[in-house]
Image (cartoon, helix red, strand yellow):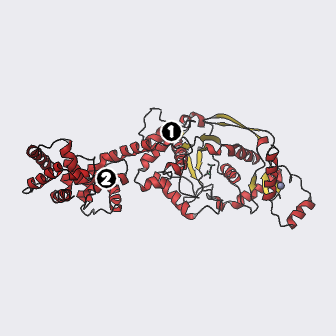
Amino acid sequence: MSELSQNHINIRVRFAPSPTGYLHVGNARTAILNWLFARHCGGSFILRVEDTDMDRSTTEYYKELLDDLKWLGLDWDEGPDVGGDFGPYKQSDRLQIYQDYANKLLAQGNAFKCYCTAEEIKEKSELAISKGESVNYDGTCYQLSQEQIRQFESQGRKPVIRFRVPSEEISFSDIVRGTITFDGDNISDFVILRAVGIATYNFAAAVDDTLMSISHIVRGEDHLSNTPKQILIHNALGHTSPNFVHIPMILGSDRSKLSKRHGDNQVRQYREKGYFPEALVNFLSLLSWSSPTGDELLSMKRLVEEFTLERLSKSAAIFDLEKFNWMNGWYLRNIEFDKITNMAIPFLEKEGYDISDETFAKKCIGAVITRADYLQELATRCSIFFQDEVMFENDTLMKSESSKKIFAEFLNETKNITDWRGETFKQIMKTIQQKTGVKGKDLWMPFRMALTGLEHGLELPNVVELLGLEKSKQFIQKAINT
Ligand code: GLU
Ligand code: ZN
């Protein structure tokens, strides 16, 4: 167990996603770091689904979320699907609990009913802004008389419940960032229960972290401003807050917050392109953590062994797709070849290739494996072996006198060939060179273009062996006719 965790014998961490969209790589990293910490310490990893935003949360996203987490190789000890002693684990099943605790805070004087309408609040804050004053809640409803309350209710107003933020400093020690202090005077009396009786995020999360005995909260630094509010709630409920770690946001290559603009940012998108979960876990872990050995290619097992919160970094994490591709490519070439082919076949099928000859398909995969980083790319690269007609990247090359000459010679030399291998092709190229005087690039480039449609690519003898004699002749004939 790591040093900083010693005063918590029971390590209990949670991943608390909202099922309002597909799993973002930033949230996946949060899940992974929590999971690694729990597994490293022999603690518990809890999945809590924060679905109190009924308009945006869907069952579909909930299911996909669980599916993506499992695909990553994560498992949880407690959660909505597996149960546990601290359930229910879906916040929509805990609404009564939040109402009870809101009433408790009301009774204790930590919270109050507020009858101000949204329009009134908006007007007041606009006025405050225009005067350069604080936009904090102005205290209108601190001490309403019974008469005022009756009046509001007769107008049909439904109150929200606000937490009464004390005028004091709120300090906590972040394991990565050290002591962080907020001034209560800068925090508005925030809503904990909406008029419809549904808890807000800050309240539900703080109640649950308390009731679920969470020992460490590891989450993105976008939640930093929520932390003092949650600490106030923990305290009002008579509990000590968990330990906090806020990890830096993931940025795109231009150092702005990672978004759609930067390309794929959902786990699902990488999954669909044939990236490997091991590679994604490896890559995302290293976005804000590093191994004490400095190694970068780390299995899940090693990550679990080496992971400690102390090695989390506070500097921004850049999502470098090139690096991820490199890493995934390493996995592609180091996972057992049989496993790779099994995973790659569906991608070849999706491209519409005829893969009825599995041995042939395997050979094709083997031929391009050093030229691809993920399975979809690998499948695309295999196209040269499955096409019935070649589309030339550049057909001027096909039209020259010298090309016509060498192609004609190829058809001539292959007339009586029966045993077709890469070696046979090499031999024939030598003969063509001797007979026509064409050599080097002038010889090989036209053939490459004629046989694959590409200017650059794989070793040509390997390609033609897989293409077979008939197709090779057919493609050369087409090139002559171009
Ligand atoms: N539901 C919140 C989110 O997805 C959880 C934040 C937290 O970890 O407290 O951002
Ligand atoms: Zn009010």
The verdict on label 1 being within 8 Å of ligand 1 is: no
Relative to 106, 30 lies left or right: left
Q: What label sits on residue 157 in the rendered view? A: none
Q: Residue furthest left?
A: 416
The residue where tag 1 is placed is 307
- Locate the N terminus and report the quarter of the image it occupies: top right
Residue closer to the observer: 265 or 277: 265
Packing grade of label 2 (10 A; few <14, some 14-19, many >=20) is: many
Q: Nearer the viewer, residue 220 or 71?
A: 220
Q: Is residue 303 above or below residue 355?
A: above
For numbered disc 2, what is the local secondary structure?
A: helix
For badge 2, the amino acid type reads Arg
Determine if the C-beta at disc 2 is less than 8 A from ligand 1: no
Query: From the viewer's perspective, is residue 459 above or below residue 52?
Result: above
**Tag 2 or tag 1, which sits nearer the N-term?**
1
Assess whether mark 2 and mark 1 are in contact (beta carbons under 8 angstroms): no
Left/right placement of residue 177 relative to residue 23 reads right
Disc 1, SS = loop
Q: Nearer the viewer, residue 71 or 478?
A: 478
Q: Whole-percent x and y of residue 219?
A: 60, 45
Seen at 37% across and 47% down, the residue is 373
Q: Residue 381 has which mark? A: 2
Residue 470 on image: x %, y %: 16, 60
Q: Residue furthest front?
A: 401
Among the 4 quarters of the image, the one containing residue 133 = top right
> Could you tell me residue 124's position as x and y percent?
82, 52
